[in-house]
Amino acid sequence: MTDYQTKSLCFDDIEKGQEYLTASRMVTGQDVLDFARLTGDHNRLHTDPEYAKGTAFGAPIAHGLLTLSVANGLYMQLGLFEKYTVANLGIESWNFKKPVFFGDSLHVHLQLEGKRQTSDPRRGVIRWKVTVVNQKGQSVAEGIWNKMFLTRAAIGQSEEENG
């Protein structure tokens, strides 16, 4: 794993083979209810403990998209990528592997899957392999995130303009 740094990383700073681990965050029943209110997804599997007891899971579980949202929040809380990330370009082949139960603690493991320069020398695309892991060390979700980053050329140009 890469040691955490205090500076933000641009496209040029992220090298093949680098990996990052985020901090952990517990998913609570209140998180799930808040997500249901925000999105309008009040499926009883997530919001009704009595109903959920009778399902294959035996208890309420978090929405898959809540897990994805928590993962993105943990990614941003690293503080390494926020300053030079231009855009989320897409999520590929995202899979929910195991349920997330109330009280589960999640963290994210990021691996550089690939990177490419765009036709604009001020931007590059980072392809992250993202794995969301619970407190038992089990992968609960995984996939590929594509994010556009500024390059060192863009940062130098920006600093000169603000100089």
Image: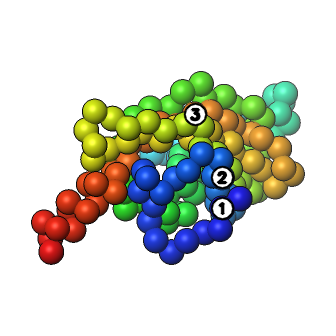
Q: Is residue 20 above or below residue 132?
A: below
Q: Secondary structure at mark 3?
A: strand
Of the 4 image quadrants, the one containing the N terminus is: bottom right
Q: Residue at x 21, y 68 (%)?
A: 159
- Disc 1 marks which residue? 2
Residue 12 got which mark? none
> Which residue is outermost to the top?
93
Task: Specify whether residue 44 is in view.
Answer: no
- Closer to us: 76 or 80: 80
- Closer to us: 39 or 151: 151
Q: Residue at x 55, y 63 (%)?
A: 78
- Closer to us: 74 or 59: 74
- Residue 135 in picture, x, y percent from top left: 81, 55
Whichever of callouts 3 and 1 sits on the residue coming sooner in the sequence is 1
Task: Specify whether residue 20 is in view.
Answer: yes
- Disc 2 marks which residue? 19
- Residue 71 in picture, x, y percent from top left: 59, 49
* Amino acid type of the residue that numbered disc 2 sits on in the rendered structure: Glu
* Amino acid type of the residue that numbered disc 1 sits on in the rendered structure: Thr
Asked if the residue under mark 1 is in contact with the one under mark 3, i.e. CB atoms within 8 Å, the reply is: no
Q: How many marks?
A: 3
- Residue 5 in picture, x, y percent from top left: 55, 71
Whichever of callouts 2 and 3 sits on the residue coming sooner in the sequence is 2
In-image side of 111 versus 133 (left or right): left
- Disc 3 marks which residue? 144
- Residue 113 in picture, x, y percent from top left: 60, 37
Q: Residue at x 38, y 38 (%)?
A: 117
Q: For mark 3, does the 10 Å Cα neighbourhood hold few (<14), some (14 to 19), or many (20 or more) residues?
A: many
